[in-house]
Image: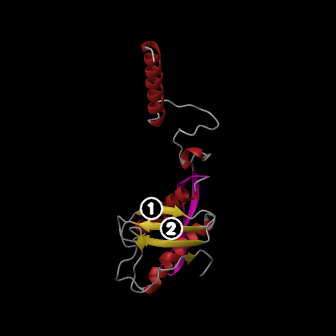
Amino acid sequence: MSIKRLLLLSSLLLVGGFLFLMLQRNWLIVHVAYFPFSPTSTADNMKSAPAYQKQITISYYKNGGLVREESIAMWHENDIAQTLKQVVKQWLNVLQDAHLLRPHLAVATVAVATGSGEAYVSFDSALFIKEMSIKSKWLIIESLCKTIRDNELALHALTLLNNDHPMDDDHLDFSHPLSLESRL
């Protein structure tokens, strides 16, 4: 093999390797209908509508009666998990302002099972104070379910978690998902 051909082949391989490296590091973006080397993610492939503010209804029980408050939350049209997270955050804020829940309780993660309509909401600490009565705990759970129903999120069941583990309570069983059907 002559030196000219060796240099040409080396140069082509060097340029090809450099282009491949640029594609892998996303330094070079090629928009082609099918390109097997470009990294893709499901978030990039989803056509997501922009988020917007929407007025939502927060329901809770206080002093023996149902209280409804209007609040504003970010609504993600194509991402029900993000929308649910925003609704639960607003629900927590309202109940903390009403002194029904401990302060500094927050939503850690929210996930929605695709196709089943089942949601998983994980809080960063225990949702209930140990001294709460069973009725108070149940009314808090019902208020969360009612808030989700009233805001017409397309969900059928809800699983409550504490730090991504099943919620543990001495009085209530959280080993099964809660139905979002009307109970009270």
Gap between marks 1 and 2 measured at Cα: 8 Å
Q: Position of residue 181 (x, y in %)?
A: 62, 76
**Please, what secondary structure does the residue beneath circle 2 have?**
strand
Q: Residue at x 45, y 68 (%)?
A: 95
Quadrant the C terminus occupies? bottom right
Q: Residues within 10 Å of mark 2 (few under 14, many from 20)?
A: some
At a point 53% along the width and 73% down the height, the residue shown is: 143
Magenta residues span 53-77
Q: Quadrant of the N terminus?
A: top left
For the stretch drawn in magenta, the main secondary structure is strand
Q: Residue at the spot x=37%, y=73% of the render?
A: 126
**Residue where numbered disc 1 is placed:** 109
Specify which label sits upstream in the sequence, 1 or 2: 1
Tell me residue 94's x, y (percent).
46, 65
Q: Secondary structure at mark 1?
A: strand
Q: Residue furthest top?
A: 4
Q: Nearer the viewer, residue 142 or 169?
A: 169
Above-or-below relation of 147 to 47: below
In this rendering, position of residue 124 left or right of residue 140: left
Q: Is residue 118 left or right of residue 11?
A: right
Q: Amino acid at mark 1?
A: Thr
Indicate which disc residue 120 carries: 2
Query: Is there a contact, CB below 8 Å, between mark 1 and mark 2?
Result: yes
